[in-house]
Amino acid sequence: MRWSLVLIVAAILLGLEQAVKGPLAVGSTTIAPSFVIPLVVFIALFAPPLTAMWTALLVGLVVDLATVWSNGVTELVVVGPSALGYLIGAYFVLTVRALLYRRNPITLMAMSVVAAALAGVFFVAVHSIRMMYTDAYSFPALTELGHRLLASVYTGAAGLVMAFALFPMMPLFGFHDPRERRFGARK
Amino acid sequence: MSRRLLNPRTALTFAILALIVLAFAPPRLAGWVGAFSSPIRTVLAPLSRPFELVLGLRLTDRELSPNESETLSLMRQERDGYLRETNQLRAENDVLRRVIAELQQGLELNVNIPVRQFQAPVIGSSMELSSRLLTVRAGVREGVEPKASVAVIRGVHLVGRVVGEPSDRFCSVLPFTDRSAGPIQGVVMFGPTQFGPACFLEPRGDGSLVGRLRTESVLLPTGAESASLDPAGGDAIGGVRAGMIVRLADESWPQSAQMLEIGIVESVQLLPEDMRIRSVVVRPQFRIDRVSDVTLRVPAPPAPPPPAAAAAGGVP
């Protein structure tokens, strides 16, 4: 896999996500699509397992570092909820990808929904546990859980749209196709 | 051995373990992680800016006052500014009377805190919508101080206040509508300069605030007194109507921020479980989490004493 291209695409999508997540949110809720989760899913569908997991971890880490929490007095950065959440999502895709028709845009959409839901549940779980021993910010767990599960459906829609941009770019990403090795017909 | 430790699989395991520890670490142990946040936000800001500009996602000054000519918009802004000033001056007048009385008892109070205002662009917001913190391009270099610096739009509409430790170039503004910002106290305005009842508001997380109107008259931080609600009167909701302006009157906010506009009353009703409690919903006039620029009101350095006073004080 070409890391340089992944980094460029990830940077563009992180910028896009930061810019449009708020305006695309449903009312003033946190129900908004993610554009980086479909990328993580796309890489998990085609890249070697270790590469896919590192990508998920690093993209999630950037999201964590770009999110600042506050209680009105101090600032706090919590590293881990998104990074590990994305990793769980990517790991799920890696586990089931052998059963999927990977080159179908619907697959990217469906897997984006599941990965976003798993990442969302983990995110809420971590922050809910944190709320037991810190008051550094406010986090309404139940509302957040509902919003994040709905947001995962929204992310699926974003994934479907992104599939039409990402799939044509597949040769550029330099994914190694396991079938080529099996038949000894490496190009 | 070192090769085994450095292989990607082992490194991934260590990274996962480190992240699990950091995810649950209490703030005092994981506070150092924040140092890495600023560079990431600095890199992401220029990446998101083109999308915001191309898609027109941020509310510019023109969009904040649609269908208005520039002159009318300026006049309206000027009027709002004068109204705020009038209310504050009126309140300060009351304070000065109290100060005189207190000074006569040997107390010294400093009520007139000078502020400096300047425009600063909002260069980013949080990646996760659960936190609505805004990153503003103005920092210690511009004199931004945490807690004492307040962000507004269109001169009088409150956005939030600076939280955390501002860096040299950036600071974080927590909108007062964010759930983490906590409760805020305000006063409903019956007229441009007529104080109504005070209210205690809490952010709901959807951009609005909900709270209860205080039946008793309270002393506002500006020195003025709010109106009391007469429970025996004919009007069950004490004359408070949708559309009335609510201004900031909260001791936990800087003195210079008092009387800034929180929003307008969206609805007011009696709670069915207790008919003596009047619940009020207040919503800011603008989507403050989507503004492209804010005006920062930072404490100004104290003015040097006049030469005569300095000379008098300088001679032993």
Image (cartoon, grey):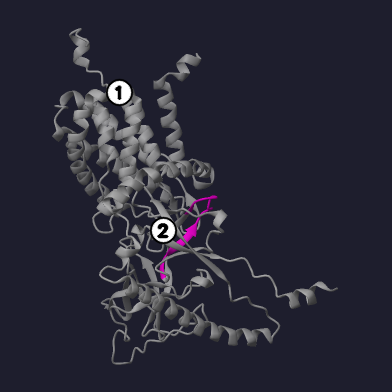
Q: Is residue A124 visible?
A: no
Q: Looking at this view, is A16 or A112 the one in front?
A: A16
Q: With A65 as the anchor, is A102 left or right in this view?
A: left
State which chain disc 1 sits on: A
Quickly name the residue at label 1: A49
Quickly name the residue at label 2: B180
Q: Residue A143 in the image: x percent, y percent?
A: 29, 54
Which contiguous range is marked in magenta? B157-171
Q: Amino acid at mark 1?
A: Pro
The local secondary structure at tag 1 comes to: helix
Q: Residue furthest bottom?
A: B233
Q: Residue A62 in the image: x percent, y percent?
A: 39, 39
Residue at 25%, 46% (x, y): give it.
A33
Residue at 46%, 37% (x, y): give it.
B21
Count how many numbered circles sit on residues in the image: 2
Q: Residue A114 in the image: x percent, y percent?
A: 22, 38
Determine the image quadrant of residue B274.
bottom left
| Residue B70 is covered by the magenta coloring | no
The local secondary structure at tag 2 comes to: helix
Above-or-below relation of B272 to B170: below
| Residue B158 is covered by the magenta coloring | yes
Q: Residue furthest top?
A: A184
Q: Is residue A166 visible?
A: yes
Task: Identify the image quadrant of the C terminus of chain B.
Answer: bottom right
State which chain disc 2 sits on: B
Residue at 41%, 44% (x, y): give it.
A66
